Image (cartoon, grey):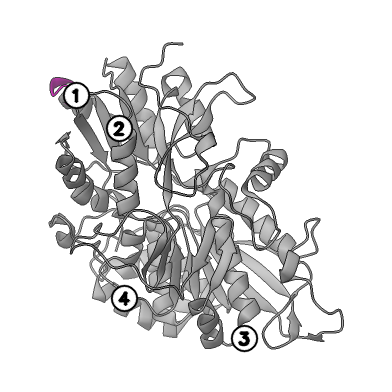
């Protein structure tokens, strides 16, 4: 079932994103068959029989790493072991990521993190059974398609026989992979998917554990950042017809209206829309001075350039996902100066990697040196490797998926995105709505640890890079260092 289709359940305000039983049942059947979810299985057509849309399956060559070799960065406690440890069976970590398609911007930090995980693993890790196990990482491209994400996840589970799965980069990638793992009984760790859309109607998973912020954090940051700029409090909202977009369009306007804002929201548009004239005209006629939404980078680029051409002049704009990447901001040119976005992760955050011992600043520096590009917030997905390696390392038998799951369930780990503690008391919701939790870090549900969220603004400061991502708000990230937070500036910035 394509995540770009809107379910009836999503029409109800405040509902969780639907995950149909028929899809889950299909995945269970396909998981038993093994090859039925392999690379050549045509899962898109099979899901169409369950009520989804049929697609033509295009098989891209899998990107599979050879067994990891020793890198130049020490892995700290992970590989500090006796050289005489008994050799254990080879282990495999699977990773699904959008390397191509509309979400391909996520692929660059994803690939970098795979390289760093391999360095941390070196020639093997001594696990809870006292044996040193060589570990390889097998990566598959979702092609930015949710059906293919499920398909390649099935291939990694049933054909490659991975011991643990990792997945990141939006609900369109995370959700189908998690569902496939649940159907097949494979441990999976994930990030980069707002936790409410990760959970959907399933309030609890067995095989899956997730670390990322939630809607309560995003809404709080949206409001807090807008309050820093004087406006008429009229918001133009843009959401696409995806799992992310449908969830946020059902809930974000209510939050902002309760804070005294008026929200003008056209119907959700289809991904890869090229002409936003109708939305821009409506925003102009309604006197919109604020823009909010959730858009992939190519869509926002089209909208924002057209808005400038057609005379829409908001004073503040904070759109999720679209301008996480410096490349996306630079592609906009001068009209990008002053755009705001959520701040998942930043070089100024006070955290340290459990794999390499690097601080956030050191990780950012290493990425910039190796990739010759500016640091990017999605480097936080490095935490997937930290969680997966923790699960294998602490399992009493890392070849047993039940033992790996037990290790993850009891995870208490300091990571590059902050402390994760799935043993901590679960924070109670403040109401019955999907975003009714206190904003900020904490153990929000059995399967979710929320790492919090900051707010930022892209500013042209005359440094090495055309635009720099400047922290401006810590409403949902109390750990942010005050001295790094700068005042927000209104759009347009004129010098």
User: Please, which residue is most extreme toward the front here?
Assistant: 482
Find out whether residue 287 is within the magenta segment: yes
- Determine the residue positioned at 58% across, 70% down: 388
- Determine the residue positioned at 45% across, 55% down: 192
Pick whichever of labels 1 and 2 is earlier in the sequence: 2
For marks 2 and 3, give the CA distance. Answer: 50 Å
For marks 4 and 1, give the CA distance. Answer: 46 Å
- Mark sitting on residue 24: 4
- Mark sitting on residue 226: 2
- Mark sitting on residue 46: none
Q: Tell me the SS state at disc 2.
A: helix
Q: Find the magenta span and give its range.
A: 283-288
For marks 3 and 1, give the CA distance. Answer: 59 Å
Which residue position holds label 3? 399
Pick whichever of labels 3 and 1 is earlier in the sequence: 1
The location of residue 67, given as percent across then percent down, is 73, 69
Which residue position holds label 1? 232
Q: Tell me the SS state at disc 3.
A: loop
Between 204 and 135, the residue placed more toward the observer is: 204
User: Please, which residue is most extreme toward the right here?
Assistant: 84
Q: Tell me the SS state at disc 1.
A: loop
- Determine the residue positioned at 53% across, 66% down: 166
Which marked residue is nearer to the observer: mark 3 or mark 4?
Answer: 3
Pick whichever of labels 3 and 4 is earlier in the sequence: 4
Between 198 and 472, the residue placed more toward the observer is: 472
For marks 3 and 4, give the CA distance. Answer: 25 Å
Which marked residue is nearer to the observer: mark 2 or mark 3?
Answer: 2
Pick whichever of labels 2 and 3 is earlier in the sequence: 2
Q: In which quadrant of the rendered image does the N terminus lie? A: bottom left
């Amino acid at each position: 079932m394509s995540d770009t289709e809107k379910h009836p359940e999503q029409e109800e305000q405040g509902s969780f994103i639907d995950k149909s039983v028929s899809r889950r049942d299909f995945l269970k059947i396909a998981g038993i068959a093994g090859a039925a979810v392999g690379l050549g299985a045509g899962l898109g057509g099979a899901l169409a029989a369950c009520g989804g849309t049929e697609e033509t399956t295009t098989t891209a060559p899998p990107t599979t790493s050879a067994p990891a070799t020793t890198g130049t960065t020490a892995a700290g406690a992970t590989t500090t072991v006796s050289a005489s440890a008994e050799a254990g069976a080879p282990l495999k970590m699977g990773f699904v990521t959008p390397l191509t398609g509309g979400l391909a911007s996520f692929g660059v930090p994803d690939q970098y993190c795979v390289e760093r995980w391999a360095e941390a693993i070196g020639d093997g890790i001594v696990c809870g059974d006292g044996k040193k196990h060589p570990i390889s990482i097998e990566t598959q491209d979702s092609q930015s398609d949710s059906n293919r994400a499920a398909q390649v996840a099935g291939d990694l589970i049933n054909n490659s026989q991975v011991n643990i799965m990792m997945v990141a980069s939006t609900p369109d990638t995370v959700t189908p992979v998690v569902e496939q793992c649940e159907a097949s009984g494979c441990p999976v760790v994930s990030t980069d998917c707002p936790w409410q859309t990760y959970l959907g109607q399933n309030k609890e998973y067995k095989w899956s554990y997730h670390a990322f912020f939630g809607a309560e954090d995003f809404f709080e940051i949206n409001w807090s950042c807008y309050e820093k700029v004087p406006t008429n409090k009229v918001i133009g909202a843009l959401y696409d017809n995806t799992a992310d977009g449908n969830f946020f369009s059902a809930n974000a306007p209510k939050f902002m209206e309760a804070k005294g804002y008026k929200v003008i929201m056209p119907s959700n548009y289809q991904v890869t829309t090229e002409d936003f004239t109708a939305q821009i005209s409506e925003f102009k006629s309604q006197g919109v001075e604020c823009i909010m939404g959730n858009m992939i980078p190519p869509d926002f680029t089209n909208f924002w350039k057209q808005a400038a051409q057609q005379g829409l002049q908001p004073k503040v704009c904070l759109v999720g996902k679209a301008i996480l990447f410096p490349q996306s901001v630079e592609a906009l040119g001068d009209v990008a100066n002053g755009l705001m976005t959520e701040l998942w992760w930043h070089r100024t955050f006070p955290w340290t990697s459990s794999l390499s011992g690097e601080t956030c600043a050191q990780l950012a520096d290493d990425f910039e040196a190796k990739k010759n590009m500016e640091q990017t917030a999605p480097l936080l997905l490095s935490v997937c490797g930290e969680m997966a390696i923790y699960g294998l390392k602490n399992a009493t038998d890392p070849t047993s998926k039940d033992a790996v799951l037990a290790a993850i369930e009891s995870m208490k780990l300091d990571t590059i995105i902050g402390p994760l503690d799935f043993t901590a008391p679960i924070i109670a919701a403040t109401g019955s709505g999907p975003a009714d939790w206190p904003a900020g870090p904490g153990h929000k549900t059995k399967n979710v640890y929320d790492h919090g969220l900051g707010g930022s603004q892209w500013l042209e400061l005359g440094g090495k890079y055309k635009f720099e991502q400047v922290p401006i708000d810590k409403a949902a990230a109390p750990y942010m260092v005050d001295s790094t937070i700068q005042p927000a500036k209104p759009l347009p910035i004129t010098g």
